[in-house]
Image (cartoon, grey):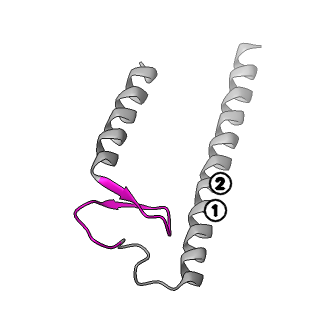
């Protein structure tokens, strides 16, 4: 069941990406109908670097929470089965 849901989510993401451009400067996506990137077109190079670092930190933070959650579930499952 999860495989079907993840496949459908992947298709939805691919469909949305067809209508979007990836900015070469900040690497974020925006609609093709927009001429300039709304995320970084008004920012200096320094602020764009800060934006990229902030997004990278957010992604790694989420991964850490997911890892700790998975470990907690495994430990609980181990104790319930013994």
Q: Which residue is mark 1?
A: 57
Q: Residue furthest left?
A: 33
Q: Nearer the viewer, residue 5 or 34?
A: 34
- Asked whether 40 falls inside the magenta stretch, the response is no
| Quadrant of the rendering where the C terminus is positioned | top right
Residue 53 in the image, given as x and y percentages of width and height: 62, 68
How much space separates mark 2 and mark 1, taking CA atoms? 5 Å
Q: Percent from the top left, x then y, of residue 45?
A: 56, 82
Q: Quadrant of residue 7?
A: top left
Residue range (magenta): 20-36
Please name the residue that numbered disc 2 is placed on.
Answer: 60
* Quarter-of-image position of residue 59: bottom right
Magenta-drawn stretch contains 30: yes
Count of marks overlaid on the render: 2
| Label 2 packing within 10 angstroms: few (<14), some (14-19), many (20+) | few
Element assignment for label 1: helix
In this rendering, position of residue 65 left or right of residue 23: right
Residue visible at 48% across and 64% down in the picture:
24
Magenta segment main secondary structure:
loop
Q: Disc 2 vs disc 1: Cβ atoms closer than 8 Å? A: yes
Answer left or right for 51 relative to 76. Answer: left
Against 13, residue 3 (above or below) is above
Q: Secondary structure at mark 2?
A: helix
């Amino acid at each position: 069941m999860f495989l079907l849901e993840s496949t459908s989510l992947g298709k939805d993401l691919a469909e949305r990406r067809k209508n979007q451009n990836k900015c070469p400067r900040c690497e974020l996506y925006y609609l093709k109908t927009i001429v300039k990137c709304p995320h970084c077109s008004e920012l200096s190079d320094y602020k764009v670097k800060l934006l990229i670092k902030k997004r990278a930190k957010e992604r790694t933070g989420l991964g850490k929470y997911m890892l700790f959650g998975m470990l907690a579930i495994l430990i609980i499952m181990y104790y319930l089965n013994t």
